[in-house]
Image (cartoon, coloured by chain):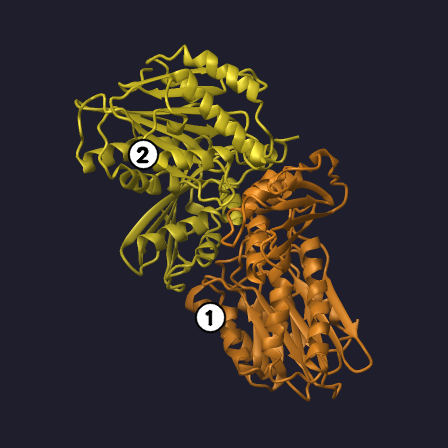
Chain colours: A yellow, B orange
Amino acid sequence: MKLPSGFTAASCAAGLKSSGALDLTLILNNGPKFDAAAVYTSNQVVAAPVIWSKQVTKEKIVRAAILNSGGANACTGPQGFADTHRTAEHVGEVLGISSGEVVVCSTGLIGELLPMEKIISGIDQISIALSTDSLQDVASAIMTTDSVSKIANFKNDHFEISGVAKGAGMLAPALATMLSVVMTDALLPDNAQEIFQRVCDRTYNRIDSDGCTSTNDTVLLMGSGASGFAPSEPELESALMEICGSLSQQLIADAEGSTKTVAIEIKNAASESDAVEVARACARNNLLKCAIFGGDPNWGRVLAAVGTARAHLNPLDIDVTLNGVQVARSSAPFEDRNKVSFENRLVTIEVDLKVGSSNATVFTNDLSHDYVHENSAYAT
Amino acid sequence: MKLPSGFTAASCAAGLKSSGALDLTLILNNGPKFDAAAVYTSNQVVAAPVIWSKQVTKEKIVRAAILNSGGANACTGPQGFADTHRTAEHVGEVLGISSGEVVVCSTGLIGELLPMEKIISGIDQISIALSTDSLQDVASAIMTTDSVSKIANFKNDHFEISGVAKGAGMLAPALATMLSVVMTDALLPDNAQEIFQRVCDRTYNRIDSDGCTSTNDTVLLMGSGASGFAPSEPELESALMEICGSLSQQLIADAEGSTKTVAIEIKNAASESDAVEVARACARNNLLKCAIFGGDPNWGRVLAAVGTARAHLNPLDIDVTLNGVQVARSSAPFEDRNKVSFENRLVTIEVDLKVGSSNATVFTNDLSHDYVHENSAYAT
């Protein structure tokens, strides 16, 4: 699979993953433009590569991104930051660019130093193997416990966008983190950061597999301008929504241990932020998520979760519809809960708050035996 | 086991539980005082008995409490409220007291109406069987999925307190709710509500088994004044702390599906509320709770959880001690994580924030296969 014009990349198995799979990837933007925007984890405790890359993207110029799986380089102290710095310096040297224009992303176990010699020799290896035909390998090299790689493409007559992502919201074990790189040959407008933040808020920030916020989450947008085309803002935003929306859905579909994808649709909230707050309260309610795993139409858990949200509610007048069956009207039993079918992977929970006209949907997963199993036996 | 002087009670199997176990209990305060204080769930969606009882306890006079298991009477609409009202009215009639002085508590599945004929005939039966020797039955009748009943007693030369509780924080299935009644023969001061709120904030509100807030939680304090003794405020508060602290520990020890009790001790926070906020962020982090279930000393999950708290932190200077082993110093690896033993039920996580001098401990449980199992198969 080809990268958008202006980009080259290469990946290798540097030996960070004991499996011998691809674990290091380098993306180079060959220009003529080096536009960038980025969104990072909201966690106060952040990994060394996040501290570094935040500084880099502040200038909105990124020439290269180096990403590794097999280690998060989080909670690793001054040595961890020195390692990130050294990684960027080395990429800068071998490519003849400034290290201050190199984004670094890491993903894997927290609290362990990276094996730097492996990373340095991996960089040497891939920096001379850069090609335009390497999108699939980029997507593979950033996988941790993902069962499939995640790629999305957009193309019209004027420009194209390709995106990759790894992780499953924050559900992947040990907070192995969500990483995503979106590349386009379009010319990006001055307010690309603002547009990209808005897109991320409505895509990546609307998936919430387990409520756990990672130390490493990074979403990076790189624009080469190689198409010479400047899309209008709505055109760009819509294309980015398509890419990031697709990648988000791929993440939630592959969430660890999950047997269901759950769409929580909040309707008629007083504000969009209220709608998101209510949806998130449901997405983070373990009892509700266990019920969905068990195929149990226990709608009382929906209302109990809704009631914990810091949002404007009329507690006695809420409707709940589970997979098309209106099980509660005005916060009391309505249609027979036994009519609800849980045959499909997708479960839709509609909550009508009837206090306004704002809507939002958050996607989550069920809470399964496998989630507990996979997350209780990762580091040891 | 005897009730404090001034109190009588009786319990029966009214037929609400299919098991035929005790499921209805009536507590009568015979005075001479009828002092009361109460604390309720913070959920916006509350059960009919909570709406009723909040009105009753506003007046700070409670003569009787009727409690049932086998049904929460939550999300049951106007009929549910009428049923609660009828329950209080009937207790008032048979005891010759005002229904406005009768607290009603219900616990069990949400979204189902109570079988009122069974409750009415149960009330008839127990109202003529009231005795002073019935504390154990009161504790048994409010159990849902509890494996043991929870009772605590305090006695000195002047007054005594007995308390019962059911549930396991909010961990019991279907939000089967936490209920607790604390009875004393002491004369309660005018600010009993304030004292009781403070005690609850530092006991019941510091256990958080699964982050799920119920629709029915009620903690009721009843004072008969039969001892004729008015303890000083510190003396009363200290005795109540002992009772409510003991009941809280009994709840967390019996939390559904749990294999570990986890004490999360936050030290040197900027404020007590910051300390509680950080502790709660850990207590609600599924990845951390899975790691503890697996006996995995994955301290990175502690710091990642701490970083999500809305509290003043110095993210690069936090110490973490797991069961006595200081696995992280200044947010970086310190002692070998493999030294940590998970042999005992109690797991202690100490987090030193080093930004102030306030401390707080929140108790939680691990997230286990059995938690998922028991909560995915309750209603069906």
Q: Kindly tell me whether residue A181 is visible in this rendering.
A: yes
In terms of image quadrants, where is residue A156? top left
Find disc 2 in the rendering and name its residue: A60
- A142 or A167: nearer the eye? A142
Residue at 72% over, 61% down: B149
Mark 1 vs mark 2: tell me if same chain: no
Considering the image in quadrants, where does the N terminus of chain A appear? top left
What subunit carries mark 1? B
Judging depth in this view, the residue of A49 and B136 nearest the camera is A49
Q: Residues within 10 Å of mark 2 (few under 14, many from 20)?
A: some
Residue at mark 1 to residue at mark 2: CA–CA distance? 59 Å
- Res. B76 image quadrant: bottom left
Name which residue lies at 71% across and 34% down: B336
Measured from the top left, where is residue A324 in percent x and y? 35, 45
Amino acid beneath label 1: Phe
Q: Which residue is mark 1?
A: B81
Graded by Cα atoms within 10 Å as few (under 14), some (14 to 19) or many (20 or more), the crowding at tag 1 reads many
Q: Is residue B118 above or below residue B28?
A: above
